[in-house]
C-alpha cells in the first residue's frame, strides 16, 4: 500500500486469488494500477493480452515487449525521440500520440530500479479535465477543438485535439509537448494553464524491482524523473478488445460533461 497526496494506493499482487477484479476496479476508478510480482517477458505478455491485442512498437521485440534503459548514446537515430531510452527526465505524455487511435492500455514493469531518481510520474486526465471545466473553460474549449495540436513521430504530421470525444461518448486525452508535439502560438497561454493544472494532480511513484504500472493511456498521462545507475523497464502497449477476458470490462477514456 502506498500513500500519495493523501490518496491510498493499493498494490495488487498478481499471484493473489482474484487479482483481476482488483485491477479492473482500480483502472476504472483511478485510471492506473500499481502491481507487484516476479514476471519474465513471456509472463508479462500473457498478462497483457488478457486486455486485448499487442501494439507492435517499432522498438519492441518479437513478443511486443520494449526494453527501456539508458541506451540512447549507443543508438544512431535522427528520426526517433529517444528521451525514453536515456537517463533524462521525460515529461508527461501519451504513448504513441501520433497514432490516429493510440493503444489505450500501457504496461510498465520494473526489472531493475535505479539507485537515484527514476520515479514514474502520472496525472489523471479526468481530474485535469474537470479542473479546467470549472476554472478555465475557454482553455478547455480550445483543447477540445480539433487542429490546435500537431503530433509528430510517425511518417506524417497529424493534427488533433488534446481532449477527444470517442464513439462511446467518453473523452480521452492525447498530449505531448516535446519535439514531437507542436502548438500554434495562440495556444501558448492555454498550454501554460494546462501545465500548471498538471502539477495539481501529479503523482510520483518510486517503482521497486518486480513492481509495475498498468495505465489507461487514453486517460492518464505518464512521465519519468531523471535517474542515475542502471534502470531496466519493460513496456507493452495494448489495444483493448471487447472480446478479451479483461478488455471487455474496460471503459475507453473517461466520462465527463462539458
Image (cartoon, rainbow, N blue to C red):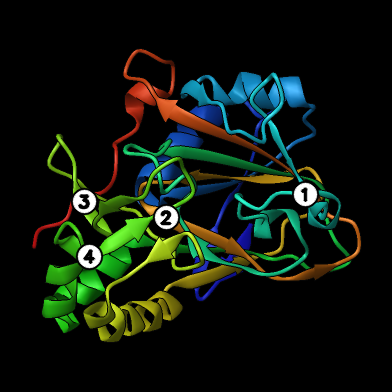
Tell me which label, 3 or 2, sits earlier in the chain.
3
Q: Distance of mark 3 from mark 2, alpha carbons? A: 14 Å
Please name the residue that numbered disc 2 is placed on: 220
Please name the residue that numbered disc 3 is placed on: 164
Horizontal side, residue 22 vs residue 208: left or right: left
Q: Are marks 1 and 2 in contact (CB under 8 Å)?
A: no
Could you tell me which residue is drawn at 26 percent across and 49 percent down? 254
Looking at the rendering, in which quadrant would you find the C terminus?
A: bottom left
Tell me which label, 3 or 1, sits earlier in the chain.
1
Q: Residue furthest left?
A: 258
Q: Distance of mark 3 from mark 1, alpha carbons? A: 35 Å
Which circle, 1 or 2, is nearer the viewer?
Answer: 1
Q: Secondary structure at mark 2?
A: strand
Please name the residue that numbered disc 4 is placed on: 148
Q: Distance of mark 4 from mark 2, alpha carbons? A: 20 Å
Tell me which label, 4 or 2, sits earlier in the chain.
4
Amino acid at each position: 500500500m502506498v500513500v500519495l497526496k493523501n490518496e491510498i494506493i493499493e498494490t495488487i499482487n498478481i499471484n493473489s486469488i482474484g487479482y483481476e477484479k482488483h485491477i479492473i476496479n482500480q483502472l476504472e476508478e483511478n485510471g492506473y494500477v500499481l502491481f507487484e510480482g516476479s514476471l519474465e517477458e513471456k509472463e508479462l505478455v500473457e498478462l497483457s493480452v488478457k486486455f486485448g491485442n499487442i501494439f507492435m512498437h517499432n522498438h519492441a521485440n518479437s513478443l511486443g515487449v520494449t526494453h527501456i534503459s539508458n541506451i540512447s548514446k549507443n543508438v544512431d537515430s535522427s528520426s526517433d525521440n529517444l528521451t525514453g531510452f536515456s537517463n533524462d527526465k521525460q515529461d508527461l505524455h501519451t504513448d504513441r500520440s501520433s497514432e490516429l487511435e493510440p493503444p489505450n492500455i500501457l504496461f510498465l514493469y520494473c526489472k531493475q530500479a535505479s539507485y537515484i531518481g527514476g520515479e514514474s510520474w502520472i496525472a489523471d486526465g479526468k481530474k485535469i479535465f474537470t479542473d479546467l471545466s470549472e476554472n478555465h473553460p475557454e482553455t478547455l474549449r480550445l483543447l477540445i477543438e480539433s487542429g490546435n495540436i500537431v503530433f509528430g513521430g510517425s511518417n506524417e504530421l497529424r493534427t488533433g485535439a488534446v481532449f477527444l470525444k470517442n464513439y462511446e461518448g467518453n473523452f480521452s486525452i492525447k498530449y505531448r509537448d516535446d519535439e514531437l508535439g507542436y502548438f500554434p502560438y495562440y495556444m501558448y497561454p492555454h498550454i501554460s494553464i494546462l501545465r500548471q493544472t498538471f502539477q495539481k494532480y501529479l503523482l510520483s511513484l518510486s517503482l521497486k524491482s518486480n513492481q509495475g504500472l498498468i495505465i489507461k493511456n487514453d486517460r492518464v498521462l505518464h512521465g519519468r524523473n531523471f535517474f542515475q545507475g542502471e534502470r531496466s523497464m519493460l513496456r507493452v502497449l495494448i489495444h483493448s478488445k471487447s472480446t478479451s477476458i479483461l478488455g471487455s470490462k474496460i471503459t475507453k477514456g473517461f466520462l465527463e460533461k462539458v
